[in-house]
Image (cartoon, rainbow, N blue to C red):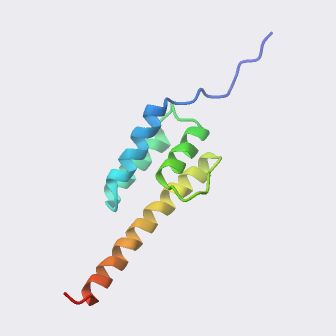
Amino acid sequence: MARKSTVKKPASQAAIAVYADQLRAARVDRAGFNAVLEAIRSDPELGPLDVATIGNAYAVDGVKAARRRAGLDRIEKRFIELVRDQAKRKVADKFRPI
């Protein structure tokens, strides 16, 4: 008897692109970011490699995630980087001459 495959079929590239675009659109909005991240975590159609692909598309820095947890970590780290960069710019703008 043949074994049933437990590997999930990859999600469509369109779904992956939609999630990556939603993350980019959230920018530094914590509520918007959390909503998209929760949708990614709870989407039953997304497999581990799909989440890693979303993380790679969102956090373009040359490092590639290969697992679900690594993809989620990259997404969260990229959001923190964006928030920190915005805070640094605000402080720098205060001290720049007009």
- The x and y percentages for residue 33 are 37, 54
Q: How many marks?
A: 0
- The x and y percentages for residue 27 are 34, 58
Quadrant of image for the C terminus: bottom left
Instruction: Tell me the residue at 39%/39% (across/down).
Output: 18
Quadrant of image for the N terminus: top right
92 or 32: nearer the viewer:
92
Report which quarter residue 30 is drawn in: bottom left
Instruction: Tell me the residue at 43%/39% (across/down).
Output: 17
Residue farthest to the front?
98
Residue farthest to the top?
1
In the picture, measured across the screen, residue 9 lies left or right of residue 81, that is right
In the picture, measured across the screen, residue 82 lies left or right of residue 4, that is left
Q: Examine the rendered structure and indicate whether residue 8 appears above or below residue 93.
A: above
Q: Examine the rendered structure and indicate whether residue 29 appears above or below residue 90.
A: above
- The x and y percentages for residue 85 are 39, 72
Instruction: Tell me the residue at 32%/84% (across/down).
Output: 92
Residue farthest to the left?
98
Instruction: Tell me the residue at 38%/68% (across/down).
Output: 83
- The x and y percentages for residue 3 are 76, 17
